[in-house]
Amino acid sequence: MQHARLIGGIKRVTAALEESGLREALGGSEPTDPERLLEALRRYSIAAARYDLGESTVADLLGLSELENSSVWARLLSDDAARRHFHERVGFVTHHLPRFVELLEETTTVPSPEATLCVSIVGEETQRGVAVSRVVTVINCLERLYEVGMDAHGLVSGELRLVSLDDAGADTLLWFEGDAAALQPLKETLTVAFRWLALYDEGELEERLQVAAQQLPLVARIHGLARTDTFDDDEADLLEHEVLMGLLAFFDAGALIPEMAQDLRRDPRAIVTPPPPPVAIGEDPLSKLAREIEQLADRESSAPPPSAPPSSDPVIELAPESVELLDDDLADELWPEDEDWDDETAPVR
């Protein structure tokens, strides 16, 4: 499935370059019109901002990601060598690379994009792969959402199939195939719900669930079928609950699909990235010593007055490592010499 994603990424990047007119604007050996070049760069940058993860990877591998940098724009306006370099590179992508893609497609059966679903589970930069429990959660959620969509649209065949699991750096990619008539509503459901359920405070969750239920076409379709007696009201309410809980679990597992990035200003990956685990910070020896001394002082200050002697002296033990931190002068000040004192066994008073 990485093969299919590579082909799709090449096609998307090639189309963006051709539509921008960048190769013609660069001019090669011809004089360059600055305004025309800037307009072509602007058009390409707008298209590149909508690339999904696979398309961005293709652009980076082809050395085109620099075209989104304003400092490179300045070089292209003033440096003939830089213009020739990118003129040749863009020309290779738009004129020669499509021929390689055609050869690849002739030897490989590539399913239509409408019949495939790519899910990225965001991992931690310091860890390889993701927890199995998160993968299982994502698969179970998608399977149930797909089944509900099949029922809501009256489809009877075309189960959801996991066809590939790929490593993409810290992330894990899951590739699914299924009935296009069911996958398209599923993608729409995930994309619409992402705005309301992927990032929330616990205090506003109930309100966001209500808004999501009102915004989701799948939920509206379910209740529409209930009005025509295809579902009864209780069944419709149960399906709505399953859809909302499945979506919450999907996003809480750190999962997203490329379609979410197409109309959002904020990177969806940043929204669903799991927070780093809390760092366990041990108590340093000096802090431990200070805490034990404070406990000793509290015990002594709370002791009964002399007229009512305690039945037993309050005792607190210092840890051996804390005792070692005390110098001789501080130890003498806290505990004066006593002939009957046993340094090894007596408790601290």
Image (cartoon, helix red, strand yellow):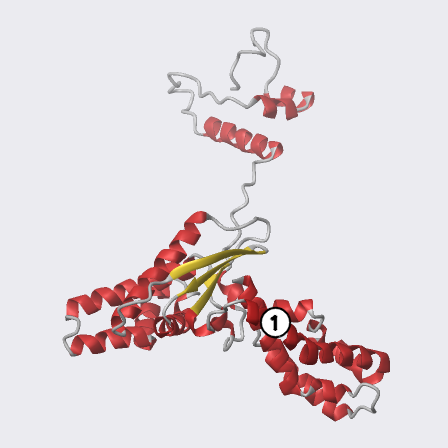
The relative height of residue 323 versus residue 12 in the rendered view (above or below) is above
Task: Choose top left, top right, bottom left or bottom right for residue 209.
Answer: bottom left
The relative height of residue 251 versus residue 339 in the rendered view (above or below) is below
Task: Choose top left, top right, bottom left or bottom right for residue 200.
Answer: bottom left
Q: Is residue 317 left or right of residue 161?
A: right
The relative height of residue 297 versus residue 64 in the rendered view (above or below) is above
Is residue 141 in view from this perspective? yes
Q: Is residue 209 left or right of residue 96?
A: left
Q: At 51% from the left edge and 21% from the top edge, which residue is drawn?
A: 317
Q: At 57% from the left edge and 54% from the top edge, which residue is drawn?
A: 170
Query: Which of the pair 105/25 is nearer the observer?
Result: 105
Residue marked by disc 1: 103
Dot 1 alpha-carbon crowd within 10 angstroms: few under 14, some 14 to 19, many 20 or more: few
Question: For the view shown, which residue lies furthest in the top direction?
Answer: 340
Tally of numbered tags: 1
Question: For the view shown, which residue lies furthest in the front direction?
Answer: 107
Query: Which of the pair 340/30 is nearer the observer?
Result: 30
Query: Which of the pair 275/172 is nearer the observer?
Result: 172
Please provide percent x and percent y for residue 97: 67, 75
Please provide percent x and percent y for residue 49: 60, 76
Which element carries disc 1, helix, strand or loop?
helix
Query: Which of the pair 33/303 is nearer the observer?
Result: 33
Q: At 43% from the left edge and 74% from the top edge, which residue is drawn?
A: 114
Q: At 44% from the left edge and 48% from the top edge, which residue is drawn?
A: 132
Q: Is residue 258 left or right of residue 196?
A: right
Please provide percent x and percent y for residue 48: 61, 77
The relative height of residue 327 versus residue 30 in the rendered view (above or below) is above
Please provide percent x and percent y for residue 40: 69, 87
Is residue 202 in view from this perspective? no
Q: Is residue 39 left or right of residue 27?
A: left
- Name the residue type under label 1: Leu
